Image: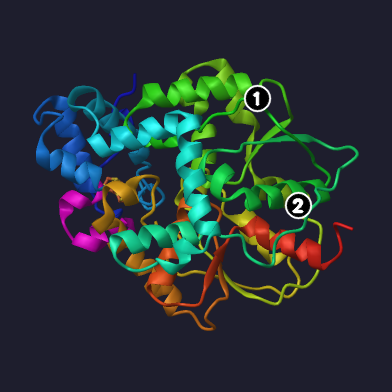
Amino acid sequence: MGDFTALDPCVHCGFCLPACPTYLATHDEADSPRGRIVLMRALERGDLPADDPALRQHLDACLGCRGCEPACPSGVGYGRGLEEARRRIAAEAGLRPLARLTLGIFSRSSAWRVVFGAGRWLRDLGLAHLLTGSGRTGFAFGMLAATRPNPRGGVAAVPEAAAGPTVALFRGCVMDTLLGHVHDATRRTLAANGYRVVEAKGQRCCGALHDHAGDQAGAARLAQANLAAFGESADFIVVDSAGCGALLNDYGHLLGTESGRQFAGKVRDVTELLADRGPATGGALPLDVAYDAPCHLQHAQHVHRQPLDLLRSIPGLRLQELPGSDRCCGSAGIYSLLEPAMSRKVLDDKIEAIRGLTPRPDLIATGNPGCLMQIGAGLMAAGLETGVAHPVELLDWSYAAGGLYR
Ligand code: SF4
Ligand code: SF4
């Protein structure tokens, strides 16, 4: 069981406020990290019950993006405090019905495969793209349409590396059903850089959505299943979804076991493994690309340089870092489903930052399915021509153009 000690260093200075997207959206102290810490302390002391409406409203409105952590000079572990607060609220007051339903789907692969399989069918028929819009339903279709494989992709075979470290790909749920082409790009680019890619059977959802909602027991059950599935299958466990990677890296803490820590010690984001190898240089890709860092890569895993190094290694690619890249896009797992109004408010700032770029980028590169879908839908709703892609896809297209897969 956790506690709130990670919040102890807070001196209420307020330096974290300008880094918080929800505070910037509402200018309400209770929607800031400092205000939420006061609420969490009240929960801890029992001054506020777990079902207090204001407590729930302001903690539910937190994205869990941890953008406040690097802004804090005292080293407050805001994310750990939030995790404990949400665990207590879920245990004492229960999950919201929509959260319970959604997490129930993610707990069973038979359920999420049906849901996302139907989504993929709508997408592949072109219906999602046709129904895209700025209203709630149109935006949901936009998120689906944003997962379409880019026509530049589609190289068939995965080259085999004869020797080198073995890597087992973490497949996940959204990634495996809607973004399988990103997995293919991950396999190809790793093999082209000397990694032997192996499959670990019996994998489950990572449990991040359960963990963020306060259902640590549900997350731990999925984590145990993943420990059993991966076993000693590879030297590294590679992840191309920042949200999944953040929790896989935290399995030691979640499970409190040595096997959890050993599993976490093997987890690498795909950009880390590729950057370690150079990566190999491909052909020219004359595109304007802006990089937006996923919160769960930058703030939770502290991986920032590697995706930029990977993109800079691509000949002809003109790279800029999106201003405000350190700020959340409003996706945050199932947050966009549970808190749609705040999610869209936070996204609006991201879309305005993209609109202000000169030259206007062809693509926004970001390494997380939620961010790809949220930003992709936001761009479509705003009528902008800019698309979205995972950084590893860009490297893959460059390798195809340079003949590395022949
Ligand atoms: S979390 Fe850090 S930055 Fe924010 S008020 Fe507390 S000490 Fe200051
Ligand atoms: S986690 Fe994100 S939304 Fe929540 S208080 Fe920190 S910066 Fe604000």
Element assignment for label 2: helix
Residue 134 percent across, percent down from the top left: 32, 68
Q: Could you say where residue 349 lies in the image, as x and y percent from the top left?
A: 34, 68
Q: Which residues are magenta?
A: 17-33
Q: Residue furthest bottom?
A: 358
Residue 339 falls left or right of residue 332: left
- Residue type at the position of mark 2: Thr
* Position of residue 141 in the picture relative to residue 17 (left or right): right
Queried on whether the Cβ of the residue with tag 1 lies below 8 angstroms from ligand 2, the answer reads: no
Instruction: Name the residue that disc number 1 marks.
Output: 230
Q: Position of residue 67 (x, y in %)?
A: 38, 52
- Identify the residue at horizontal 40%, vertical 24% (top origin): 218
Q: Is residue 79 above or below residue 230?
A: below
Of 192 and 377, the residue lying toward us: 377
Quick one: SS at disc 1? helix
The circle on residue 189 is 2
Compare residues 391 and 72 and report the one nearer the observer: 391
First-in-chain label (1 vs 2): 2
Q: Quadrant of the C terminus?
A: bottom right
Report the Cα–Cα distance between label 1 and label 2.
Answer: 21 Å
**Position of 381 relative to 195 (above/below):** below
- For residue 139, the mark is none
Q: How is the image coloured?
A: rainbow
- Mark 1 is on which residue type? Phe
Taking 197 as reference, is 260 left or right?
Answer: left
Whether residues under marks 1 and 2 lie with C-beta atoms below 8 angstroms apart, the answer is no
Residue at point 48%, 55% (across, down): 122
Image-quadrant location for residue 378: bottom left
Is 200 or 7 nearer to us in this picture? 200
Measured from the top left, where is residue 99 in percent x and y? 29, 37
Residue 27 visible here: yes
